[in-house]
Image (cartoon, grey):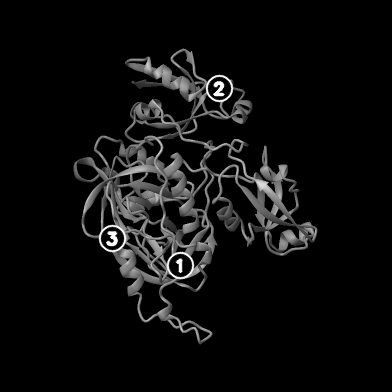
């Protein structure tokens, strides 16, 4: 998906897309998958390029070792929405300033009304798990995966995470070539890297560059209002390796051929590469795909703090004794940090022994953890450093793992639902209800209504609904049409949506 980026370069930004935005119906999580056995990277094998007797490494003579090792593990992905879904409603979801980027032909559809998107993916296990960008496969009716050797498979979407723009898909095959995940913390600015993908539908293209920066926040993953699950995390690896439409979801590798990031976005005024590209670091990839495979949804731990980068203005205004770190300006409800003794005005300087100099760096470190995990935070309080052990909480203020529930409601209505949390009930003054987290193309809600995400269902016909379980039971007992009644957060109006069920 295209997301507008504000105030980074004087260029328009676009997410790295394939031929078109991926559209379609959601593939629902079908029970718990087995854990992925990820291959960990070994120490570098390209020492022949380094002269250890000199202070400065030599430039590699070529990149063939890494390219030959990695290209078999990078795949081509084609996502399709079948004819019948309404492209006009989808057009309205795209910011107007970006619609001309695609042209009218995109919204009109492809062959026989189909909409298609193409991108790349990276095989991360020998039994067919593949990581790609969420915007490559999000809402697709069908996902086709083509391997390096031209074999083609139907892909199953295991789970998606819009907060990091990552997705996990699966093909049924064994003994596949796959990439090991490197420790992206070890990647250094100035280090040579390669981008492997399928730009412009050109199979297995390799480009080279260096890491230009780490921990970049480019505001491409916008927070969605009224969606409690929306908590975008951006801490991109920035490179100058050429990345173009079709590279989305492809591999950013080191000279050992190991994965250090998933190519996601470019900086451009034309939609083509203009000098900078951005990749989700492998540290985040590892955590997200592990959660999606085990739980169907990402388990995110929260500190529960309001934060800002320390800069000269804050140092002067708050009379700080440190010039780098993360300034704590307040706390959320049920804050894990506050419970552990953190105070307003403290400055976070390290997490688990790693220095953090910016909000994206902090977010990246915390994003590796689940609710209930303990993290060591080193703070500077009035010039004195203090280590605090914090137990992270989930978005509802507890340490429980949030497991995505497989529901008949999801499958039949084409939406993602969740029970209202105790905090939501208190805030909206409701005894219960079901939140509509996402509405998917191809489902009955999208087909029959203009219901928006964030809607809270209180009743089915005239029967109260207090949980997803209630919703399932009521729908199972109904035949024909149903009336979904409820409201939107902050509204006093009651809305009624009729669905031919």
Please give the residue where the numbered disc 2 appears in the rendered image: 432
Pointer 2 or 3: first along the chain: 3
Q: Nearer the viewer, residue 23 or 31?
A: 31
At 37% from the left edge and 56% from the top edge, which residue is drawn?
248
Q: Nearer the viewer, mark 2 or mark 3?
A: 2
Q: CA distance from mark 2 to mark 3?
A: 49 Å
Which quarter of the rendered picture does the C terminus lie within? Answer: top left
Image coordinates of residue 11 in percent, x first then y, are 46, 62
In this rendering, does residue 1 appear at all? no
| SS at circle 1 | strand
> Of the numbered discs in the image, which one, if any, rests on residue 200?
3
Q: CA distance from mark 1 to mark 2?
A: 48 Å
Q: Nearer the viewer, residue 66 or 409?
A: 66
Q: Image quadrant of residue 312? A: bottom right
The residue furthest left is 112
Q: CA distance from mark 3 to mark 1?
A: 20 Å
């Amino acid at each position: 998906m295209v997301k507008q980026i504000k105030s980074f370069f004087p260029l328009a930004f676009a997410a790295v897309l394939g031929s078109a935005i991926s559209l379609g119906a959601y593939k629902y999580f079908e029970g718990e998958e087995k854990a992925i056995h990820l291959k960990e990277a070994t120490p570098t094998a390209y020492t022949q390029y380094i002269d250890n007797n000199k202070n400065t490494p030599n430039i590699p003579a070529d990149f063939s070792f890494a390219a030959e090792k990695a290209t078999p593990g990078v795949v081509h992905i084609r996502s399709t929405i079948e004819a019948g879904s309404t492209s006009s409603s989808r057009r309205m979801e795209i910011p107007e300033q970006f619609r001309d980027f695609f042209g009218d032909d995109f919204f009109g559809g492809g062959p026989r009304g189909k909409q298609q998107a193409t991108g790349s993916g990276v095989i991360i296990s020998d039994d067919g798990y593949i990581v790609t960008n969420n915007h490559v496969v999000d809402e697709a009716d069908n996902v086709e995966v083509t391997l390096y050797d031209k074999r083609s498979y139907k892909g199953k979407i295991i789970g998606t995470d819009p907060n990091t723009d990552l997705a996990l898909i699966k093909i049924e095959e064994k003994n596949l070539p796959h990439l090991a995940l490197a420790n992206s913390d070890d990647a250094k600015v100035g280090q040579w890297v390669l981008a492997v993908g399928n730009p412009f539908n050109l199979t297995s293209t390799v480009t080279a560059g260096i890491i230009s920066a780490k921990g970049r926040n480019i505001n491409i993953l916008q927070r969605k209002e009224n969606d409690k699950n929306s908590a975008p995390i951006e801490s991109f690896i920035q490179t100058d390796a050429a990345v173009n439409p079709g590279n989305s979801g492809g591999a950013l590798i080191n000279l050992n051929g190991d994965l250090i990031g998933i190519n996601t976005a470019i900086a451009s005024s034309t939609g083509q590469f203009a000098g900078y590209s951005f990749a989700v670091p492998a540290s985040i990839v590892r955590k997200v795909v592990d959660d999606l495979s085990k739980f169907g949804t990402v388990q995110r731990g929260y500190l529960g703090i309001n934060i800002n980068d320390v800069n000269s203005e804050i140092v002067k205004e708050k009379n700080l004794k440190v010039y780098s770190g993360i300034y704590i300006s307040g706390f959320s409800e049920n804050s894990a940090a506050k419970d552990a003794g953190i105070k307003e005005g403290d400055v976070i300087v390290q997490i688990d022994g790693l220095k953090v100099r910016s909000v994206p760096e902090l977010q990246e470190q915390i994003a590796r953890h689940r609710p209930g995990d303990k993290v060591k935070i080193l703070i500077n309080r009035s010039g004195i450093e203090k280590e605090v052990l914090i137990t992270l909480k989930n978005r509802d203020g507890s340490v429980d793992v949030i497991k995505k529930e497989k529901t008949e409601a999801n499958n039949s209505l084409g939406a993602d639902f969740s029970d209202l949390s105790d905090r939501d009930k208190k805030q909206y003054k409701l005894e219960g209800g079901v939140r509509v987290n996402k509405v998917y193309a191809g489902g009955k809600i999208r087909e029959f209504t203009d219901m928006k995400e964030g809607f809270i269902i209180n009743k089915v016909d005239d029967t109260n609904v207090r949980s997803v379980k209630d919703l399932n039971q009521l729908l199972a007992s109904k035949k024909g049409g149903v009336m979904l009644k409820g409201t939107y957060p902050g509204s006093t109006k009651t809305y009624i949506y009729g669905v031919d069920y």
